[in-house]
Amino acid sequence: MGIQKHRRSRKAGLTRRAHWRAQVPTLVECPQCHQRMRTHYVCPNCGYYAGRQVVEVEEAETKRR
């Protein structure tokens, strides 16, 4: 195990850890179905990307009582 040669100040430690947080993904409106989707990804709701359908999306079945 290495031996610490110089003490790191509290400010330096806090500055180094300042960006350790989860990032919120950028969401945009899908031009086809107008649902929120991640940029540069296939829309999970309609399956379109760049104006053409890329993925076949199955419709969800309604729950019966």
Image (cartoon, rainbow, N blue to C red):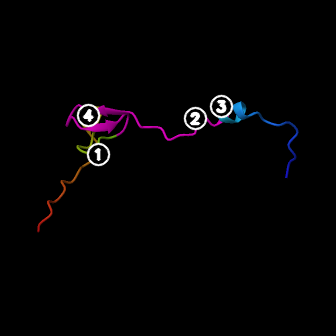
Q: CA distance from mark 2 to mark 3?
A: 8 Å
Residue pictured at 58% horizontal, 39% vertical? 20
* Secondary element at tag 1: loop
Q: CA distance from mark 1 to mark 2?
A: 30 Å
Q: Nearer the viewer's eye, disc 4 or disc 2? A: 2
Residue pictured at 29% horizontal, 45% vertical? 44
* Secondary element at tag 3: helix
CB-based contact (under 8 Å), mark 1 and mark 4: no
Q: Which residue is mark 1?
A: 44
Residue range of the region highlighted in magenta in the rendering: 15-41
Dot 3, how many residues are within 10 Å of its Cα: few (below 14), some (14-19), or many (20+)?
Answer: few
Dot 1, how many residues are within 10 Å of its Cα: few (below 14), some (14-19), or many (20+)?
Answer: some
- Which numbered circle lies on residue 30? 4
Q: Nearer the viewer's eye, disc 1 or disc 2? A: 2
| Sequence-earlier tag: 4 or 3 | 3
Which of the 4 image quarters holds residue 12? top right
Dot 4, how many residues are within 10 Å of its Cα: few (below 14), some (14-19), or many (20+)?
Answer: many
User: Residue 61: where, in percent of width, then height?
Assistant: 16, 60
Residue pictured at 28% horizontal, 37% vertical? 36
Q: Main secondary structure of the magenta part?
A: loop
- Residue type at the position of mark 1: Pro
Q: Which residue is mark 2?
A: 19
Q: Nearer the viewer's eye, disc 1 or disc 3? A: 3
Q: Which residue is mark 3?
A: 15
Residue pictured at 66% horizontal, 35% vertical? 14
- Residue type at the position of mark 2: His
- Residue type at the position of mark 3: Thr
Q: Is residue 33 magenta?
A: yes
Instruction: Depth check: give the residue in front, 8 or 39.
Output: 8
Instruction: Depth check: give the residue in front, 2 or 58.
Output: 2
| Sequence-earlier tag: 1 or 4 | 4
| Sequence-earlier tag: 1 or 2 | 2
